[in-house]
């Protein structure tokens, strides 16, 4: 349903619009109960920015859905917001960007069309030796990652597997970005030596 259809629906039924507004306001009030962040004001000021950020990455077709996920993540992470880290707009844009990138990654992992593939076709085309080799490599890589010290493993995982940038990963690890880069560098060097 596009915004034109929604706007037409709301214009034709003012009672429906009032109910939607009341439910949204009640949900926002509930969200604000646990934090000082004014979510209602943030939504009113930055809703279009969040959708535009999502649309710039995933396209207009999926932007509204991805923006809803971004607002949900913002709601869940509202206690982590600190004005010292930047403005609310910057915080929301980074959440929208990360959710959009996650959406694209998930879309790349999904098979294009499951109906056109039969189990027989997939199993016939599977090279068993390659599958065994890949499984061994994955197991070796997991063991090597598990052998790293906790700080290095967390840095490597956060940056290279979870897709966080240095600032986000540092905030999650509770350290400075420079310290996180050092941990990640040492972790990658250790992995290279183990896997070489």
Image: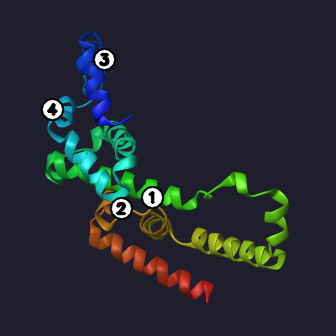
Residue to which mark 2 is pinned: 169
Answer with mark 2 or mark 1, whichever residue precedes in sequence. 1
| Cα separation between marks 2 and 4 | 28 Å
Q: Is residue 37 visible?
A: no
Q: Is residue 151 above or below residue 27?
A: below
Of residues 141 and 8, the one nearer the viewer is 8
Of residues 162 and 13, the one nearer the viewer is 13
Q: Is residue 140 above or below residue 55?
A: below
* Relative side of 133 to 54, left or right: right
Query: Is the C terminus in the top left, top right, bottom left or bottom right quadrant?
Result: bottom right
Query: Mark 3, mark 4: which one is toward the viewer?
Result: 3
Answer with mark 3 or mark 4, whichever residue precedes in sequence. 3
Residue to which mark 3 is pinned: 23
Residue found at x 25% / y 46% = 50
Q: Are marks 1 and 4 in contact (CB under 8 Å)?
A: no
Q: Position of residue 147 (x, y in %)?
A: 59, 72
Residue found at x 41% / y 74% = 184
Q: Position of residue 15 (x, y in %)?
A: 27, 9
Query: Mark 2, mark 1: which one is toward the viewer?
Result: 1
Q: Is residue 18 above or below residue 86?
A: above
| Cα separation between marks 1 and 4 | 29 Å
| Cα separation between marks 2 and 3 | 35 Å
Answer with mark 1 or mark 4, whichever residue precedes in sequence. 4
Residue to which mark 1 is pinned: 104
Mark 4 lies on a secondary structure that is helix
Answer with mark 2 or mark 3, whichever residue precedes in sequence. 3
Query: Is the N terminus in the top left, top right, bottom left or bottom right quadrant?
Result: top left
Mark 1 lies on a secondary structure that is helix
Residue to which mark 4 is pinned: 41
Of residues 55 and 35, the one nearer the viewer is 55
Q: Are marks 2 and 3 in contact (CB under 8 Å)?
A: no
């Amino acid at each position: 349903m596009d915004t034109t259809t929604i706007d037409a629906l709301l214009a034709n039924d003012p009672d429906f619009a009032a109910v939607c507004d009341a439910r949204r306001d009640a949900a926002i009030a509930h969200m604000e109960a646990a934090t000082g962040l004014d979510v209602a004001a943030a939504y009113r000021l930055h809703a279009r920015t969040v959708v535009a950020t999502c649309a710039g990455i995933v396209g207009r077709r999926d932007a509204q859905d991805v923006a809803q996920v971004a607002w949900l993540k913002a709601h869940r992470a509202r206690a982590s917001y600190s004005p010292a880290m930047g403005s609310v707009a910057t915080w929301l844009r980074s959440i929208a960007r990360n959710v959009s990138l996650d959406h694209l990654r998930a879309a790349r992992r999904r098979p294009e069309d499951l109906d056109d593939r039969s189990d027989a076709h997939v199993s016939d085309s599977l090279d068993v030796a390659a599958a065994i080799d890949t499984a061994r490599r994955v197991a070796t890589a997991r063991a090597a990652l598990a052998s790293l010290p906790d700080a290095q493993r967390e840095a490597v995982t956060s940056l290279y597997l979870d897709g966080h940038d240095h600032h986000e990963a540092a905030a999650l690890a509770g350290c400075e970005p420079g310290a996180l880069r050092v941990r990640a560098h040492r972790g990658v060097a250790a992995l290279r030596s183990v896997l070489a």
